[in-house]
């Protein structure tokens, strides 16, 4: 399949590089979805492939793809990463676990990197008691600071961190969802094919897929593959500089297996399209391209990524994108603008607001073709 031309890194209106203001829009607060649709595949789907947007339902997706197309999903599993606790003095502490560290053997204490909110930050050697929503709890020792730029707290816990989080943690709903996590969130803020635990935010475009829809896609002849990218809390980090080149992306762990690389190669050889279910899938695939030398997806790989995709980026791995609606002035707005064209994406957002689409993690979705 021939490579399409790169997106311009210049705003065609101003003739200057894009700035933060170019990705802003006004969103009525009532359009921020606070709860998921009653059925996953009953969400709305804005078909933005052509010049004129078309309003559809997400379960229409099989009719919009061709036999031989390849859908690539992010199979990360969201942790119950939010913990509520207190210091020995009684001061409240809230933790958001960013990463569970590998254990040298199954009986070793667990270690985690977490964001901590407290009236006074605990020092190395301090302890925090985290209580579970159904009683019980555990004590964590603060080992100090760790992680990128030493911005996180390094915690030691008594046992398997994944088991402790499952038993005592809360679903880490995004900051724009105003209600506390409820039993329904445990199931619905998780994809039906989630496998690898490690994310603190869901790959939200994939939340719309349910088993009947996956079966319909298979019956249509659409193939499936998967990557893993453990979405970090930095996905909600605001961009604080008008000069986009100055923005530092958060670090996330990803893996693209060789089986997915082979499936993409076979799809391309047969004339099919590679369809990414979500921006996290795009970031994983394009990170693998960069590790391969920046021109083609050649081999499976894993590692850390800080990839920042903005207008001017040359895509190599993805032809079509399914994505939710993103926060104003966010790096994800920049990614979708790079993919489908800034003016086109902003026009689609205006249509979505006028048509009362639901926005953000529990909101509706859109379908985009790569421009060019």
Image: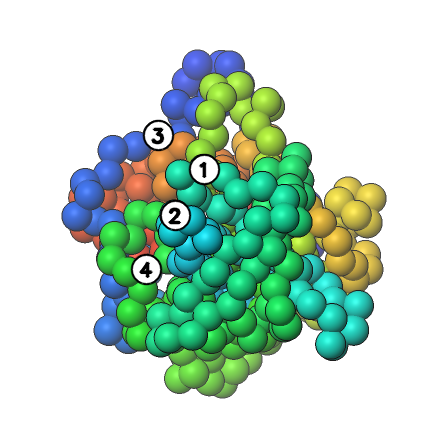
- SS of the residue at dot 3? loop
Give the mark nearer the N terminus: 2 vs 4: 2
* Separation of residues labelled 3 and 2 (CA atoms): 38 Å
Question: Residue 13: x and y, percent?
Answer: 41, 18
- SS of the residue at dot 2? loop
CB within 8 Å, label 1 to label 2: yes
Judged by depth in the image, the label closer to the viewer, 4 or 1, is 1
- 53 lies left or right of 103: left
Give the mark nearer the N terminus: 4 vs 1: 1
* Separation of residues labelled 4 and 1 (CA atoms): 34 Å
Question: In the picture, residue 1 is in which quadrant?
Answer: bottom right
Judged by depth in the image, the label closer to the viewer, 1 or 3, is 1
Which residue in the protein does label 2 denote? 91
Compared with 135, 325 (above or below) is above
Give the mark nearer the N terminus: 1 vs 3: 3
Question: Residue 241: x and y, percent?
Answer: 49, 21
- SS of the residue at dot 4? loop
Give the residue displayed 64% in from the left and 72% down from the top. 159
Q: Nearer the viewer, residue 262 or 181?
A: 181
* Separation of residues labelled 3 and 4 (CA atoms): 20 Å
Which residue in the protein does label 1 denote? 120
The numbered disc on residue 24 is 3
Mark 3, Cα crowd under 10 Å, few <14 / some 14-19 / many 20+, is some
Give the mark nearer the N terminus: 1 vs 2: 2
The numbered disc on residue 50 is none
């Amino acid at each position: 399949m021939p490579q399409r031309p790169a997106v311009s890194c210049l705003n065609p209106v101003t003739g200057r590089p894009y700035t933060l203001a170019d990705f802003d829009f006004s969103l009525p607060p009532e359009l921020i979805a606070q709860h998921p649709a009653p059925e996953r595949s009953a969400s709305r789907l804005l078909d933005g492939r052509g010049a004129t947007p078309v309003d559809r339902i997400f379960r229409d997706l099989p009719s919009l793809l061709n036999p031989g197309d390849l859908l690539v999903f992010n199979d990360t599993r969201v942790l119950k990463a939010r913990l509520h606790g207190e210091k020995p003095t009684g001061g409240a502490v809230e933790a958001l676990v960013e990463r569970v560290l590998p254990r040298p053997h199954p009986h070793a204490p667990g270690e985690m990197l977490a964001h901590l909110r407290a009236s006074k930050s605990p020092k190395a050697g301090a302890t925090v008691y985290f209580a579970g929503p159904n009683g019980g709890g555990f004590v964590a020792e603060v080992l100090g600071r760790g992680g990128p730029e030493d911005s996180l707290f390094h915690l030691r816990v008594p046992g398997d961190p994944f088991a402790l989080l499952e038993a005592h943690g809360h679903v880490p709903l995004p900051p724009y969802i105003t209600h506390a996590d409820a039993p329904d969130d445990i199931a619905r803020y998780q994809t039906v094919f989630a496998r690898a635990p490690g994310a603190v935010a869901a790959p939200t475009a994939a939340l719309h897929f349910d088993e009947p829809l996956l079966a319909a896609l298979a019956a249509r002849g659409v193939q499936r593959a998967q990557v893993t990218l453990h979405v970090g809390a930095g996905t909600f980090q605001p961009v604080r500089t008008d000069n986009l080149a100055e923005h530092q992306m958060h670090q996330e762990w990803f893996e693209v297996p060789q089986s997915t690389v082979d499936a993409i190669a076979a799809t391309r050889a047969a004339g099919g399209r590679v369809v990414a279910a979500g921006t996290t899938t795009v970031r994983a695939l394009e990170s693998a391209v960069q590790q391969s030398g920046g021109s083609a997806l050649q081999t499976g790989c894993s590692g850390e990524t800080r990839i920042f995709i903005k207008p001017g980026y040359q895509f190599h791995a993805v032809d079509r994108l399914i994505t939710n609606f993103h926060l104003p002035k966010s790096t994800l707005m920049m990614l979708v603008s790079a993919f489908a064209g800034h003016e086109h994406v902003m026009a689609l957002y205006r249509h979505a607001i006028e048509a009362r689409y639901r926005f953000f993690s529990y909101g509706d979705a859109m379908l985009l073709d790569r421009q060019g």
